Image (spheres, grey):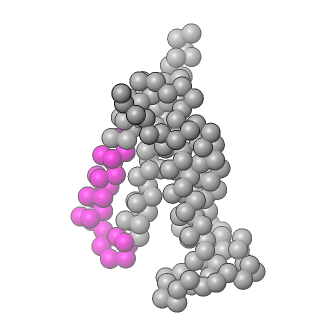
Amino acid sequence: MQKNLLLPHGLKKIGWILLIPSLLLGIAYITQLFVPEILLAGMNLPELSSNSFASSAEEQWTIIISVLGIVIGVLLVACSRERIEDELTSQIRLNSLLMALYIYFAVVILLTLFVYGLTYVAFMTYSVLGFMVLFVAIFRFKLWRLRKEGADEE
């Protein structure tokens, strides 16, 4: 008998609650659309390392909160059961994982060939988180498309 190691479906909602704000915070930090450290200003946060590339304790904690929120959120979303978890859903999950893996390694190969220095290190750091985010996006899109096709047939 095959054992399913997926998390309970209820954890998916908690994952989305963690993932979306953390992803927005990370995108805001990377693109400098607004300064997310303002959210943590005045909290008397300890500085974690004096040789860090982040210039302040607030900036260091913004990075930590963003990365941990993304990692935990995407893990809960990606590894939780669907309401109806059948063979078709499992097949879509596997295909989405493989497609995300192919895209991820193509990006890593291209980055390795064409990007150098600190830019390469930054892209590789983002790509570590990008794999699971890519998997969740592909899986959600394929499930949405399957449900839409099913609704169109009825």
Q: Residue at x 34, y 70 (%)?
A: 120
Report the magenta stretch's main SS. helix
Specify the segment rendered in magenta: 99-121
Looking at the picture, how far across and down is residue 59, in whole percent?
60, 77
- Asked whether residue 92 appears in the rendered view, the answer is no
Q: Residue furthest front?
A: 1
Q: Quadrant of residue 129?
A: bottom left
Query: From the viewer's perspective, is 129 left or right of 1?
Result: right
> Is residue 111 on the magenta stretch?
yes
Q: Quadrant of the C terminus?
A: top right
> Is residue 50 on the magenta stretch?
no
Query: From the viewer's perspective, is 9 left or right of 112?
Result: right
Vertically, is 13 above or below 44? above
Vertically, is 47 above or below 62? below
- Asked whether residue 51 appears in the rendered view, the answer is yes
Q: Residue furthest right?
A: 42
Q: Residue at x 39, y 38 (%)?
A: 96
